[in-house]
Structure formats: structure tokens, C-alpha cells
């Protein structure tokens, strides 16, 4: 090209005017949408678990007339027997959340580098911060909410199925409906999932996101190695296992000090007393969230540097 | 209006110097071809321009610093870096929806029109498309962005000649106008000879030749002469000489065409001929220095 004198020498025109606000919010929304398109396990996994569980429940409701004997056992046990399947479905959903989240996070910033699609994503006006936050929203908000909604739906279907089976046999459904307070149970489940399975393990998921933006292969292995190394050193030097216990309890959503500030109350028990004050005044929670911020900031920096692996 | 302006643009990977103090000025409305051997620094230069890699030196693209303002820059710049980078799980309809969602200058109707001319169905997933169709899809997406700068890094690698021809025809007919700027790197130089307005050769991180296509056509002449005329031709100081079926082809820079037509068959060289000449000389010079 001609490098002759250019009449518009000071051509560094000031960048176009600042974007209006709707343009700021849409990239985030669409970034979350595209994660849902790409990772259908976010809803398929809990749906699959729910389907399998419902089939099992239906079969057992038809074949085990356990409900008839309910009248003879004492009321305290009665509640437990009735509530047990509802607890099981809630527990299975929590396990599903952990599995989906671990695998999602380990791949989140790695998959796009492996399949080179990062070159496509980066050709669009979406900042690295937006991308990383959208990816962090999946394990911290979307997966828990989806799983919780599915768990509640399953519990309602179970209640209706049991009622139908009992009515068909000519038994009373009053025991079922009086022993379980469903709205309370659903709210408790939501609270439990969002605290114990989203906020509490958040540093674990953010750590996985960070490693997925850094490792060139085997992200889960790289994420686990430092944990194993630190736990091993601690065991050799101090003969204790605090670090391993800390990471483990974070991941499974139980507080190290069971009982006091623990979020691991089981959600069907109407006797449960929520202590959100305790949970939110727990320094461990805030230290965890601070760690999250550090990990995510690191992930944003890595995203900016990274190309295909 | 300068679209790209670089002063002393440098980039090193460890001890390997990929870009060695490059100065670059690309004006609006040009189609610049960046030609060079593998590892010459073409992709590194483009990556710096696109904000994909940090660099030393001064670089402004549309008045912005690409490294710190990539996301804003991408409203006015679009690029295809490498073939087959579209996510394989994505449906064509999802790609359109997503682009419309995140890109303020994306014209979905135009993309749909462009795709209607191809065999690509909107329900297909990228993984179900052939390599040529993926490139068509990517080009349709990119051409539907009202961008001021389009960067293409080896956009037709591995495609057959029909797709390549279509690619550049489509680019010129449906996209390019004098207010847009295109920078393209490719090894298939014969495809772009009629497309480019400007030419730049890059080797070992440095620009070794820079000219407009008008200059190219005016300056460079290739003469094919019979053996008995070779000495006469050599006296005119060709920049390169090669043997073709017992005759000699000599490439001249800035020698009068009339004078040359007296000694043999004159033609305008292809970019590839000039490339071989310039790179050959460049390499032998370097070897001469190291000896």
C-alpha cells in the first residue's frame, strides 16, 4: 500500500460512542444460552435421574403395599417412613448437581480451546469477563435451580402417584398429606440446594473453572493434583487431614462443623429450623466466596491470553 | 482513514522472534494480501491486530488498542482465523440466533439470504456439514456483519478449487465495497491475484516487499527467452532466473517492457513467481551474511 503522505494523518479517530445499556446485557444472556445449547447434560442428567427414580417409585408403590401397615407404627416412625423416598429423590438430585457441575467446570474453558472454537467466540464482541461469568453462572445458579425444580416436580408427582395408588386400594390418603408439608419442603429444598450445593462448594467449582482455562489436557487431574499434594504434605508433616476434609466437605455440601452452622439439614423434616443467619455469618462462607473471586479473576486473565491448544 | 497503523510492532516467543519491528499502514477500502512462508509471522501479525495476543510496539486498529479493547473492537472487525473453528455442536439456526444476540451489527436476514444460496439447512449441526460447507457458513456469518475491517487467515485452506473460487467471488460481489477493508493471508496466491489491491511479502518477521497491485503490474515483467538471448537478457539485471523447458524465464523489476519484448516473450508475472524470486533472494542474502 502507498505510504505516501496521508491527508488524514491524525487518523486515530476517537472510538465510537459508548454503547447503550441493552448492548451490555445481551452478550451475557446469550452466553448463558449457548452454554445450555452446548451442555445439554445440565438438564438431561437431572431429568434422566428423575425418570429412573419415578419408574422405580411407581413399581414399588404398586408392588409393596407398605402403606397399609403405616397405621400400626408409631407417629414418629410413620413420618420417617413416608418421607424417606422424598428424601432419597432430593439426595439423588444433590449428587447429580455435584457430578454435572464437576464435569461441566472441568471442561468449561478447556473444551473451546480443544475444538478451536475459541477463535470463533473471540471474533465476537463478547468480553472475556462476560464469558467467564456466564460459565460460572452455570454451576452456581443454573444447575442448582434446574435440579431443584426437577426434584420438586418429582416429589409432587410422587405424592400424586401415592395418593392415586392409596385411593385405588380404598385407603386413606390423610396420613400422607398431613405428614408431609409440601410447600415448606420445597422451600427448604431450594434453600438447602442454593446454600449447601451452590454457595458453599462455589470455591471448588471456581477452582475447576480456573484449571480448565489453564491446563492443556487432563483438566480434572491437574485440578486434583495440588489438592492431593497439599493433603499429602499435611499428612506427612502434621499427621492431620484438615485440608482433605475441608475440600471434601465443600464439595459434598457439608460444613466441617456438623450441626452448628452446617447447611446440611435434610429438607423434608418439618422440625428443621433454618438458620440463614448462622450460615451467612459463617466466615468460612465469605472466605470461600473471596477465593471464588480470585479464581474467576485468574480465569478471565487466562481466557484473554489463551488460544487453541 | 487508516484502518491499521503499526509502529515497531514486535513479538517474540521465547528466543524466537516472530515479528521484528514491523511498520504497517492499511488504508480504508484496500484488500491487502499478506503472503509469506510458514512461520514467517503472518498469523502472529494478524493475531496482534485482532487482540488475540499481546505484543510490543505501537498498534492501533480503527483507533483502538486491540489487546485491551478486543471486545469493543470486535463490533467493527470480524475475522475468520483458520478453517473449521465453528463449534461442531452448534446448529446453523443457533449460530444465527447467537450472532444476532451478541452482535449489534449482525444482519440476520442477510445471513439467511446468503445461506439460502447454499445447500446448508438451518437445522443442520456444524458437525454434519462438509468442510466446504462449514467455510461457506462461516463466510455467510461474517459477511452479514457490517464490519469495517475483515481479517481472513488462511480462509480457504484444504478446500477444493470450486469452493475457493466461490469464496472470493462471494466476498467481492456480496461484501466488499470501498468503505470496507480486508486483510487476507493465504498460500494459494493464484486465487487472490485478481482480488487484491495491495500486496505484502513477509519473511522471518519482517516485511520484505510492499506494493499496490498497480505498482506490481507496472514494475514487474517476466521475459521468457531462448538460450541464445540469455546473455543479452542477463545484462539487464533480472532479479530472478529459472529454467522452463529449455528456455529461461527472467524476472525484471522496473525494466522497460518494450525493451524486453525485443528479446523474448513478455508477460506479467504471477504473485507466486515474484514470491519465489523475492524469497529466494532474501534467503540467499541471509545465507551470504551467515557465511
Image (spheres, coloured by chain):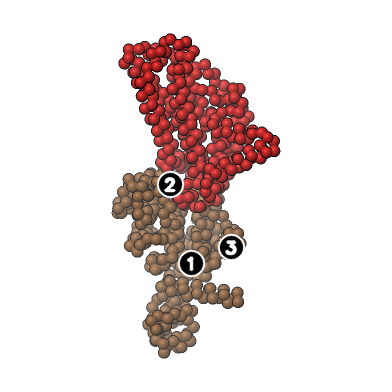
Q: Residue at x 34, y 18 (%)?
A: A165
Instruction: Name the N-terminal-most of marks 3 and 1.
Output: 3
Q: Are marks 2 and 1 on the same chain?
A: yes
Q: Residue B212 occupies which quadrant of the picture?
A: bottom left
Pointer 2 local density, CA inside 10 Å: few below 14, some 14–19, many at least 20: many
Instruction: Estimate the spatial distance between the alpha carbons at disc 2 and disc 1, rounded to whole Å.
Output: 32 Å
Nearest to viewer (mark 3 / mark 2)? 3
Q: Chain of mark 2?
A: B
Pointer 1 local density, CA inside 10 Å: few below 14, some 14–19, many at least 20: many
Residue indicated by mark 2:
B103
Q: Chain of mark 3?
A: B
The circle on residue B16 is: 3
Is A250 left, or right, of B76 in this rendering? right
Residue toward you, B101 or A207 = A207
Q: From the image, state the color of chain B.
A: brown
The x, y position of residue B32, in whole percent, is 45, 64
Q: Chain of mark 1?
A: B
Q: Residue at x 41, y 51 (%)?
A: B86
At mark 3, the secondary structure is strand
Q: Is residue A89 visible?
A: yes
Question: Which lettered chain is shown in red?
Answer: A
Residue indicated by mark 1:
B36
Pointer 3 local density, CA inside 10 Å: few below 14, some 14–19, many at least 20: few
Amino acid at each position: 500500500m502507498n505510504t505516501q503522505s496521508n491527508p488524514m494523518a491524525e487518523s486515530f479517530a476517537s472510538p465510537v460512542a459508548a454503547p447503550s445499556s441493552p448492548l451490555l446485557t445481551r452478550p451475557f444472556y446469550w452466553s448463558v444460552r449457548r452454554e445450555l445449547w452446548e451442555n445439554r447434560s445440565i438438564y438431561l442428567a437431572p431429568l434422566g435421574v428423575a425418570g429412573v427414580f419415578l419408574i422405580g417409585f411407581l413399581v414399588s408403590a404398586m408392588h409393596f403395599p407398605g402403606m397399609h401397615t403405616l397405621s400400626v407404627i408409631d407417629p414418629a416412625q410413620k413420618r420417617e417412613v413416608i418421607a424417606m423416598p422424598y428424601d432419597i429423590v432430593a439426595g439423588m438430585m444433590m449428587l447429580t448437581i455435584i457430578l454435572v457441575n464437576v464435569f461441566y467446570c472441568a471442561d468449561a474453558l478447556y473444551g473451546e480451546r480443544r475444538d478451536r472454537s475459541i477463535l470463533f467466540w473471540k471474533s465476537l464482541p463478547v468480553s472475556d469477563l462476560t464469558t467467564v461469568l456466564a460459565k460460572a453462572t452455570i454451576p452456581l445458579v443454573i444447575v442448582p435451580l434446574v435440579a431443584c425444580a426437577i426434584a420438586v416436580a418429582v416429589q409432587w408427582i410422587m405424592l400424586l402417584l401415592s395418593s392415586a395408588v392409596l385411593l385405588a386400594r380404598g385407603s386413606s390418603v390423610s396420613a400422607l398429606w398431613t405428614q408431609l408439608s409440601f410447600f415448606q419442603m420445597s422451600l427448604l429444598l431450594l434453600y438447602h440446594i442454593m446454600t449447601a450445593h451452590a454457595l458453599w462448594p462455589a470455591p471448588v467449582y471456581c477452582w475447576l473453572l480456573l484449571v480448565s482455562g489453564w491446563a492443556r489436557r487432563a483438566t480434572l487431574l491437574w485440578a486434583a493434583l495440588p489438592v492431593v499434594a497439599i493433603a499429602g504434605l499435611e499428612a506427612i508433616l502434621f499427621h492431620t487431614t484438615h485440608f482433605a476434609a475441608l475440600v471434601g466437605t465443600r464439595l459434598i455440601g457439608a460444613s466441617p462443623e456438623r450441626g452448628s452452622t452446617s447447611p446440611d439439614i435434610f429438607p423434608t423434616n418439618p422440625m428443621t429450623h433454618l438458620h440463614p443467619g448462622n450460615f451467612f455469618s459463617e466466615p468460612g462462607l465469605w472466605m470461600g466466596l473471596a477465593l471464588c473471586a480470585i479464581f474467576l479473576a485468574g480465569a478471565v486473565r487466562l481466557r484473554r491470553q489463551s488460544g487453541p491448544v | 482513514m487508516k484502518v491499521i497503523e503499526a509502529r515497531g510492532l514486535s513479538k517474540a516467543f521465547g528466543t524466537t522472534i516472530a515479528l521484528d519491528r514491523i511498520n504497517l499502514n492499511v488504508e480504508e477500502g484496500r484488500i491487502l494480501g499478506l503472503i509469506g512462508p510458514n512461520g514467517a509471522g503472518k498469523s502472529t501479525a494478524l493475531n496482534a491486530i485482532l487482540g488475540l495476543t499481546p505484543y510490543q510496539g505501537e498498534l492501533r486498529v480503527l483507533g483502538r488498542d486491540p489487546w485491551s479493547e478486543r471486545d469493543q473492537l470486535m463490533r467493527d472487525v470480524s475475522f475468520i482465523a483458520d478453517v473449521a473453528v465453528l463449534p461442531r455442536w452448534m446448529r446453523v439456526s443457533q449460530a444465527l440466533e447467537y450472532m444476532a444476540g451478541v452482535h449489534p451489527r449482525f444482519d440476520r436476514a442477510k445471513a439467511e439470504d446468503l445461506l439460502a444460496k447454499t445447500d446448508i439447512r438451518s437445522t443442520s449441526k456444524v458437525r454434519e456439514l462438509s468442510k466446504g460447507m462449514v467455510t461457506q457458513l462461516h463466510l455467510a456469518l461474517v459477511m452479514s456483519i457490517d464490519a469495517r475491517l475483515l481479517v481472513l487467515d488462511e480462509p480457504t485452506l484444504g478446500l477444493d478449487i470450486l469452493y475457493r473460487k466461490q469464496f472470493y467471488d462471494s466476498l467481492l460481489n456480496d461484501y466488499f465495497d470501498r468503505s470496507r477493508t480486508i486483510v487476507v493471508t493465504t498460500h494459494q496466491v493464484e486465487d487472490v491475484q485478481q482480488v487484491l489491491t495491495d500486496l505484502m511479502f513477509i519473511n522471518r518477521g519482517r516485511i520484505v516487499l510492499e506494493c499496490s497491485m498497480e505498482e506490481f503490474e507496472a514494475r514487474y515483467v517476466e521475459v521468457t527467452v531462448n538460450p541464445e538471448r540469455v546473455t543479452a537478457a542477463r545484462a539487464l539485471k533480472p532479479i530472478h532466473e529459472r529454467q522452463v523447458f529449455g528456455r529461461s524465464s527472467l524476472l525484471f523489476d522496473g525494466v522497460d517492457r518494450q525493451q524486453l519484448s525485443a528479446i523474448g516473450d513478455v508477460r506479467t508475472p504471477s504473485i507466486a513467481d515474484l514470491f519465489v524470486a523475492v524469497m529466494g533472494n532474501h534467503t540467499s542474502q541471509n545465507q551470504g551474511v551467515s557465511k
